[in-house]
Image (tube, grey):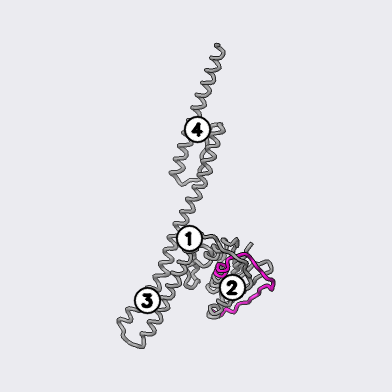
C-alpha cells in the first residue's frame, strides 16, 4: 500500500512539474508573440522546452506569422503603389485640364474669331486625352473586379494577330512605323477568350508605339510564341522589367497611365498565358505565350 502511494505521489509531482513547464513555455510564447506583433521584425517564436506539443504549437504560430508578415508587406507595398498611382493619375489628368482652363480664359479675353477655332481644337484634343486616360483606368478597375467564369473558345491566333495589326495600322503609320511581320503558316489554335486576346495584342502594339524608335518586328513562331521587338534607346533594362507594374510609366511614354501592359499580363494569366519583357542591345523584346 505504501508503495502504491509513493508511485501515486511521484506521478502527481511529475504532472505538476509538467504543468509548470508548460505554463513557462506558454508565457514565453505569449511574451515573444506580443513583442513580434509590436515591432517590425522577422523574428520567430522559440521555446526552451523539449515538449513536442509546445514545439508544435510554436511551429504553427510561426507559420501564421510568416503568412501575416507576407500579407503586411503586400499591403504596405500596395499602399505605396496606390499613393504613387494617385500622384501619377492626378498629374496626367491635371495637365490637360489646366490647358483647357487656360484656353478658355484666352477665349474670354480675346474675341478674335480667327483664334477661336484654334483654341477650340486644342481644347478638344486635351479633352480627348483626359477621356482616354479615364477610360483606361475604368477598364483596369473592371478587369480586376471581374470574378465571372471565363468564357473560352477555340481561337485561331494567327488571324487574331493579323486583324489586330491591321486595326493598329493607322496608329503605326502616324508614328512612321512599318512593321516587319513574320507569322507562321501553321494554324495556331488555342482555347482562349477572343476578346481578351485581342485586347492583349492591342495593348502590346500600343506599347510598341509608345517606346519604339521607329521600327517594329512582330513574329508568331511554330511554337505559338509571339514576340514584339523594337529599338528603344531611351529605355533601360531596369525600366523594361518594370513595364508590367501597375501605374509605372517611363518618361518617354506618350500620354500613358502605365496600365496597358499590366492589363495585358492580368488577362494573359487568366487564360494560362505568360508575358515577359527583355531589354538587350537597345532592343525591347516582349514575349507572349499560352501554355
Query: In terms of depth relative to the viewer, which is nearer, 86 or 270?
Result: 270
Q: Which one is closest to the eye, mark 1 or mark 2?
A: 1
- Mark 4 crowdedness (10 Å alpha carbons): few <14, some 14-19, many ≥20: many
CA distance for labels 1 and 3: 33 Å
Residue underneath mark 3: 100
Compare marks 4 and 1 and give the one earlier in the sequence.
Answer: 4
- Residue 145, labelled with which disc? 1
Which callout, 4 or 2, points to the residue nearer the camera? Answer: 4
Image quarter (top left, top right, bottom left or bottom right) of the C terminus: bottom right
* Earlier sequence position, callout 3 versus callout 4: 4
Question: Label 2: few (<14), some or many (≥20) within 10 Å?
Answer: many
Q: How many residues crowd mark 1 within 10 Å: few (<14), some (14–19), many (20+)?
A: few
**Helix, strand or loop at mark 2:** strand
Mark nearer the N terminus (4 vs 2): 4
Is 286 on the left-hand or right-hand side of 23?
A: right
Rendered image: mark on residue 231: 2
Element type where label 4 sits in the image: helix
Q: For this rendering, which residue is in front, 176 or 233?
A: 176
For marks 1 and 2, the one nearer the N-term is 1
Asked which quadrant contains residue 164, the reply is: bottom right
Q: Going from the N terminus, do you reach mark 2 or mark 3 first?
A: 3
Residue under label 4: 25
| Magenta stretch bounds | 175-199
Amino acid at each position: 500500500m505504501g508503495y502504491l502511494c509513493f508511485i501515486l505521489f511521484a506521478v502527481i509531482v511529475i504532472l505538476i512539474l509538467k504543468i509548470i513547464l508548460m505554463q513557462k513555455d506558454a508565457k514565453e510564447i505569449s511574451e515573444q508573440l506580443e513583442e513580434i506583433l509590436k515591432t517590425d521584425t522577422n523574428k520567430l517564436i522559440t521555446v526552451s522546452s523539449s515538449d513536442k506539443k509546445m514545439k508544435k504549437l510554436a511551429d504553427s504560430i510561426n507559420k501564421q506569422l510568416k503568412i501575416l508578415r507576407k500579407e503586411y508587406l503586400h499591403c504596405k507595398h500596395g499602399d505605396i503603389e496606390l499613393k504613387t498611382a494617385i500622384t501619377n493619375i492626378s498629374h496626367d489628368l491635371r495637365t490637360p485640364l489646366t490647358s483647357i482652363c487656360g484656353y478658355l480664359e484666352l477665349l474670354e479675353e480675346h474675341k478674335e474669331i480667327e483664334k477661336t477655332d484654334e483654341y477650340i481644337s486644342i481644347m478638344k484634343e486635351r479633352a480627348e486625352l483626359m477621356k482616354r486616360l479615364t477610360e483606361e483606368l475604368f477598364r483596369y478597375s473592371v478587369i480586376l473586379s471581374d470574378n465571372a467564369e471565363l468564357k473560352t473558345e477555340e481561337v485561331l491566333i494567327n488571324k487574331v494577330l493579323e486583324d489586330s495589326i491591321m486595326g493598329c495600322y493607322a496608329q503605326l503609320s502616324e508614328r512612321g512605323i512599318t512593321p516587319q511581320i513574320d507569322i507562321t503558316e501553321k494554324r495556331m489554335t488555342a482555347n482562349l477568350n477572343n476578346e481578351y486576346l485581342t485586347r492583349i495584342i492591342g495593348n502590346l502594339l500600343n506599347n510598341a508605339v509608345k517606346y519604339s524608335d521607329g521600327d517594329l518586328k512582330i513574329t508568331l513562331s511554330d511554337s505559338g510564341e509571339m514576340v514584339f521587338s523594337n529599338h528603344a534607346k531611351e529605355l533601360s533594362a531596369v525600366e523594361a522589367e518594370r513595364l508590367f507594374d501597375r501605374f509605372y510609366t517611363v518618361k518617354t511614354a506618350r500620354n500613358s497611365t502605365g496600365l496597358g501592359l499590366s492589363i495585358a499580363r492580368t488577362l494573359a494569366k487568366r487564360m494560362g498565358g505568360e508575358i515577359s519583357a527583355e531589354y538587350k542591345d537597345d532592343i525591347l523584346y516582349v514575349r507572349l505565350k499560352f501554355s
